[in-house]
Amino acid sequence: MNWEACCPRPQLQRASFLPLSDGWTLEGRPIRVPWPPQSALSGYSGRVGDVLHYETHFTLPEDFLPPKHRLLVHFGAVDQAAEVWLNGVPAVRHEGGYLPFSADITSALRKGENRLTVTATDTLSHKYPYGKQHKRPHGMWYTPVSGIWQAVWLEAVPERGAVASLRMTPDLAGVTLETDCGGVEYTVDIPLGNGRTVTVRSKEKSLRIDIPAPRLWSPEDPYLYRFTVTTETDRVESYFALRTVTREERGGRLRICLNGRPVFLHAVLDQGYFPDGLFLPSAPEAYERDILRMKELGFNTLRKHVKIEPEAFYYACDRLGMLVLQDMVNSGGYNWLLDTAIPNVLTKKRPDRLPGSPARRTFFEAHCLGTQRHLYNHPCIVGCTIFNEGWGQYDSDRIFRACKAEDPSRFYVSTSGWFAQRESDIQSEHLYFRTQVLPPPRAGQVLLISECGGFSRRIAGHTADRKNYGYGTADTEEALMERIQALYRDMVLPSIPNGLSGCVYTQLSDVEGETNGLYTYDREVCKVDARAMRELAKRLRDALEDACT
């Protein structure tokens, strides 16, 4: 499957979806969309400036837009600010490079050929969330992306009775479905997989649906309930899963529980970078391959690091059974001395500061809530990180409360690594340069090692031509495995009786000059012994079971 054939919104899917991936130009030169112009896959040969002018033309297929329907244009993501016109008529302006947006373009539509233009402005302003992008890539900072980097597509929706939104809140017996159908009656059909179907009709915006003989979702059995919502004029397909995420006392310590059972988040850091497409792989199957590679090594969780992916990534995690700890995308300034060196050498304590402008802070908070709403329905996401290593950190207690109020069904890491304040579901530790048995966490919090390891093993022929970067080195598979096993043997395993509920190893793959991945950047070489890694995962599960007995 390529990006053109991939449904960009699998949880609100209509038959009337038309990709706009062909015929784009950027500054008058051809470009392959949806890849960013800095990537090889885009095929773009021009200079990438701060202001980018895109253009394409389209003609609607016959009968694509029936009478009494509206035409919407959707953008998965455009970095950092976008202005869109159809046939010279303004359609929408959007700020922030990670979340989707759309516009009704019916009134500007012409018969025959139409001209769609997009102006993207990207100065890498720290007012907006920008993640690991840097104008001078080095170390843990990577090549920036600009402009369109996710799918662009058209959709025909009815003027009346359109299913505008779905929000699913599951538990262990059923699901609460919130839907906006404009006040008209709708029908929900949920096939149960045994020849039976649950069918409910309603006009209410919120509807409780119990599922007989419920089948729960887990990494071992990632069962999804497919369903349809139908009105007199509309029909959409979606899915949900039955699962809960809680913090409960087991063995005298608070633990993360999935479906009421303690689970150890055996996790790996996932930056979401690819050598040919940067922010976007060549095809959505690349997400599936990364997930299956990590499952083959025994991991059950990905920490999606300061990046929001296309929904194809989360859909793959939902289908394949991979838990996700989702980071918010950081904005604001970063200072290596204050934010990294001092907490690693001297102290991990610092009051919340107020960096940047009020506009930056307002945008960050709106982006956090927008991220939660956008990803709410994905069962794979079990928790979220708000601030990482002091980067742009301010008012973390207040923002924790706002995120928790928006979505209380998941846990939240207020401050990942250090500079913890008072309020958080998780006590997070980053431990790269020392190994220690961790004491029990602060009262009311669950203990998590959010980053560790990061041992560099450079593979000739599979490494970017940049300075080698990591947190300690290993020249062979045996040497790397010895360092990884010592890390888990001496720190992670003995900390589980004290309440440790998860550990995030850095990282899934190399990224540009950072060579501390379990796989090379091109994903062609696995640097570790898969069998030994699976045995390590079993030891973690056994240790958790013993600690909770």
Image: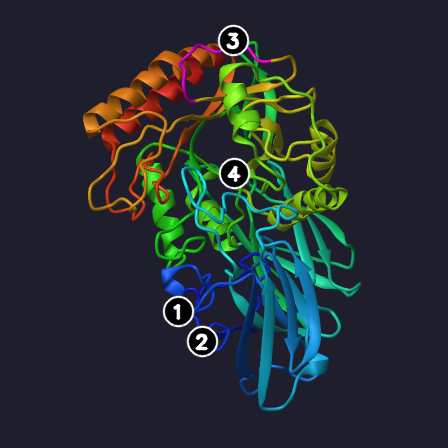
Q: Residues within 10 Å of mark 4 (few under 14, many from 20)?
A: many
Q: Quadrant of residue 15?
A: bottom right
Picture colour scheme: rainbow
Q: Say which element carries label 3.
A: loop
Over which residues does the magenta segment extend? Answer: 432-441
Three-letter code for the amino acid on which mark 4 is drawn: Leu
Mark 1 — residue? 45
Q: Say which element carries label 4.
A: loop
Magenta segment includes 436: yes
Q: CA distance from mark 2 to mark 3?
A: 59 Å
Q: CA distance from mark 4 to mark 2?
A: 50 Å
Mark 1–mark 2 CB contact (< 8 Å)? yes
Mark 3 — residue? 439
Q: Position of residue 90 (x, y in %)?
A: 71, 74
Mark 4 — residue? 216
> Which residue shows up at 36% across the image and 61% down it?
40
Q: CA distance from mark 4 to mark 1?
A: 49 Å
